[in-house]
Structures are given as structure tokens and as C-alpha cells.
Image: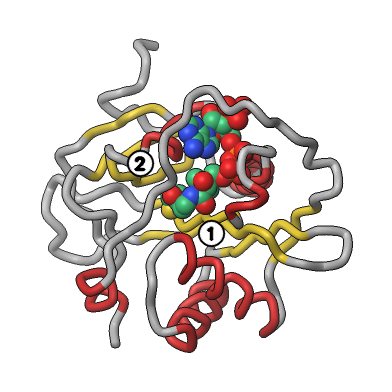
Amino acid sequence: MTISKLLKCYPMRYVEYDPSPKDKQSTAEISIRVAESEADFEACAVLSNRYIREADLESSREDTQRHAAGRGNSVLIACLPDGEIVGYARVTWVGVPPKAPDNVAPPGFYLGGMAVAAEYRRRGVGRQLTVHRMKLLSRLADEAWYIVNSSNEASIDLHLEHGFHEATREFVFPGDVSDGPGTILCHAPLGPTASRCPGCPPA
Ligand SMILES: CC(C)(COP(=O)(O)OP(=O)(O)OC[C@H]1O[C@@H](n2cnc3c(N)ncnc32)[C@H](O)[C@@H]1OP(=O)(O)O)[C@@H](O)C(=O)NCCC(=O)NCCS
């Protein structure tokens, strides 16, 4: 089954928005590294199935592995000291196909696809995965992009911390993966050659 068919069958799951969590715990024990083994990809597929979108596990694992092998892409994982993987997050290079409409999302590096195991949430794991992705991207490009559904408020708040602002809601996404109706394109300038989007503050 293709990813676009999977998306139609299985809706996204978002965490409930809670602006004031009560029980904050340390994430000192969590380390972040690049996913590279079959076991890593399998763990990402399990997290994706459980927390983002239910799908056939084998297709999910193959998709993660194929994604990680793609040019410009990476998958980072958050690990406990015993090696257990409790979160993952992707970076995807997105190009623009020939004959794309004028309002196509720009080519570049996109953050997208992140899940943290429920029992490790609100401890800064998603934040650490995003800090590492932004550091990685700051060595590769002068800007980063991200698409998010307007109803995924937790993810929106998380990314605001890392320099993202809303660019536009009037766009089409060139890749196979989109976040459904209500998707927002977000932009984070990282260096001097970053483009200017409609949401960038005045120079
Ligand atoms: C979204 C998700 C990845 C966040 O992971 P996390 O490790 O709990 O996030 P963090 O603890 O690093 O949170 C960092 C900041 O993000 C925001 N945030 C995270 N979860 C939130 C929630 N449930 N409600 C409101 N804000 C939230 C907060 O600003 C938080 O800072 P704070 O805890 O100091 O207030 C996780 O909830 C998840 O896996 N959700 C399901 C899948 C999903 O929606 N993925 C994202 C889009 S693909």
C-alpha cells in the first residue's frame, strides 16, 4: 500500500493540548542519536503505529528505513541508558517537481514525523529531538520548514520555541505526505540566505 493510501485509511492522532503540565521530570538520562539499524527502524515503526497513525507494522518499518536512506533525510531517535527507544523524529528533504503550481511549498529541509512514548512525554524528549534536528539543519541550510495541522496545538507550541513561525495556509505540498485539511506551512530562518516568507518579521 502506498503512503498516500495509508494516510486516507488511518487518521492522524494528536496529543491532547495541555498548556500547564503538573508533573515535570528530568530527561538527563535520554540521549539522541541517528537511527541506523533494523532494530532502530522497527522501534520507530512501533512508535509511529501506536502514536501517530495505525498502519501495517512491516509497511511502517520499510517506510522509515526507505525514508532514512533518502538523500538529505535523517531519522533521530531518543534512547534510555538501557537502549530502549522512546521517541523518534524525522528530517526530510523535499524537492519541487516539474510543473508544480505557483503556491507549491518551497524546496528544502522539513521537520516532520515525530512521536514520543506516552509515559515519557512532557519531559523535554520532543524538545531534545528538535534541538538536535535544528542543529543538524543549521550545518546544512539557512532555513528549515515544517508542516502541521492547525489542530495539533501541542506540536505548534513545541516548534515555536525553535524559531518557527507561520508562513502560509495557502499552499500545496509536493510530497506524498501531507497533514490533511487545515495544514499550516511554518518557516524557521537559520542563516543569512534564508528566504523571506509572508510570516517573516519585517527586515
Ligand atoms: C507532540 C509530541 C511529540 C511532544 O513530545 P514531548 O516529548 O511530550 O514534548 P516536550 O516535553 O519536549 O515538550 C516541549 C514543549 O512542547 C509543547 N507541548 C508538548 N506537548 C504538549 C501538550 N500535550 N500540550 C501543550 N503543549 C505541549 C510545550 O510547549 C512543551 O514545553 P513545556 O513542557 O515546557 O510546556 C508528543 O506528544 C507526541 O508524540 N504526540 C503524538 C504524535 C504527534 O502529534 N506528533 C507531532 C506531529 S507529527
Position of residue 72 in the picture relative to residue 128 (left or right): left
- Residue sitting at x 35%, y 52%: 107
Amino acid type at mark 2: Asn
Quarter that holds the C terminus:
top left
Give residue 44's quadrant in the image. Answer: bottom right
First in sequence, mark 1 or 2: give its number.
1
Ligand 1 closer than 8 Å to label 1 CB: no
Give above or below for 184 relative to 71: above
Disc 1 crowd, CA 10 A, few/some/many (<14, 14-19, 20+): many
Q: Is residue 32 left or right of residue 1?
A: right
Which residue is label 2 attached to?
A: 152
Q: Position of residue 110 (x, y in %)?
A: 44, 51
Q: Provide the secondary structure element on which disc 1 rests.
A: strand
Q: Would residue 110 be seen by someone viewing this image from the given angle?
A: no
Q: Position of residue 90 (x, y in %)?
A: 53, 59
Q: Would you say the beta carbon of the disc 2 residue lies within 8 angstroms of ligand 1?
A: yes
Q: Quadrant of the N terminus?
A: bottom left
Name the residue furthest front: 22
Question: Where, by quadrant of the figure, is residue 152 drawn?
Answer: top left
Residue wearing tag 1: 90
Residue 14: % across, % down? 39, 49
Work out whether 22 lies above or below 174.
above
